[in-house]
Image (cartoon, grey):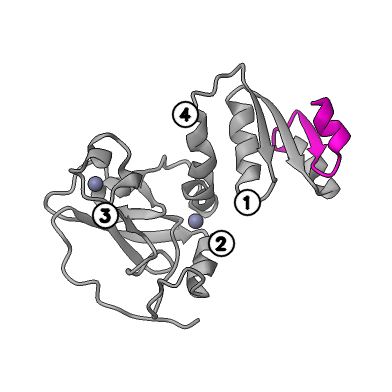
Amino acid sequence: MQPFNYDPGPLGAEEVDFKVACCGICHSDLSMIDNEWGMLAYPLVPGHEVVGQVVVLGPRAKGLLSGQVDLGWTAGSCMHCRSCLGGDHHLCGTAVPTIVGRHSGFAHRVRSHWAWAVPLPDNVRPEIAGPLLCGGITVFNPLLEFEVLATSRIGVMGIGGLGHMALRFANAWGCEVTAFTPSPDKFEEAKRLGAHQVVSTNNSQDIAAL
Ligand SMILES: [Zn+2]
Ligand SMILES: [Zn+2]
């Protein structure tokens, strides 16, 4: 790892540049650094849990872009295909992953399409917000996608980087939350994070009882 300078070129009409305040690190950054997916061209500037402030707006950039913004896995999409027009921009066939083929968040500045610079309330601390933008949205989305209700019972399998946020979301959603983990040392923490009960994935009797 070493410092790297680059010129991002002229700003596109619908693009924004933002000044990075903080950037979380995700396992996908490590996968890219190690070229596990075979789509890396060095040099790589990783980082796709970016929090900062918009400093330059392209002339056709839209949205509420003053104040704190964030950028997650995707930095751009076409805005005119069926997926984009249907609100599923992340499924756009030409969506641009923030850390693939472009330089991203572990930098002074990062660039994205305006639609992917998402406003983040100013009272959310930038140094802790990063994980919400990748692991966080991954476990929040199913609550909406599957129309989970406050009366639902939710099981969270695996209490790690994603699972610990799933416990907090599901608890705040009003659900009865069960954490599943093979690690007894995570039981108390899982309860503190919002699990109403914790079941060992190594205990088939307890699972059968549920
Ligand atoms: Zn990630
Ligand atoms: Zn599209």
Estimate how packed mark 1 is, as few (under 14), some (14 to 19) or many (20 or more) residues with alpha carbons within 10 Å: few
Residue drawn at the location 38% of the way across and 81% of the way down: 4
Q: Nearest the camera: 34 or 119?
A: 34
The answer to whether residue 57 is magenta is: no
**Mark 3 to mark 2 CA distance (whole Å):** 23 Å
Residue drawn at the location 25% of the way across and 41% of the way down: 84
Question: Could you tell me the amino acid type at mark 3?
Answer: Thr
Give the mark nearest the N terminus, 1 or 2: 2
| SS state under label 1 | loop
Residue drawn at the location 76% of the way across and 35% of the way down: 191
Of the residues tagged 3 and 4, which is closer to the observer? 3
Residue position marked by numbered label 1 in the rendering: 161
Residue position marked by numbered label 3 in the rendering: 94
Give the mark nearest the N terminus, 3 or 4: 3
CB within 8 Å, label 1 to label 2: yes
Task: Classify residue 181 as left or right of residue 153.
Answer: right
Give the mark nearest the N terminus, 1 or 3: 3
| SS state under label 3 | loop
Residue position marked by numbered label 2 in the rendering: 27
Res. 144 mark: 4
Estimate how packed mark 4 is, as few (under 14), some (14 to 19) or many (20 or more) residues with alpha carbons within 10 Å: few
Residue drawn at the location 37% of the way across and 78% of the way down: 41
Question: Could you tell me the amino acid type at mark 2?
Answer: His
Residue 160 image point, x, y percent: 67, 50
The stretch of residues the image draws in magenta is: 192-210
| SS state under label 2 | helix
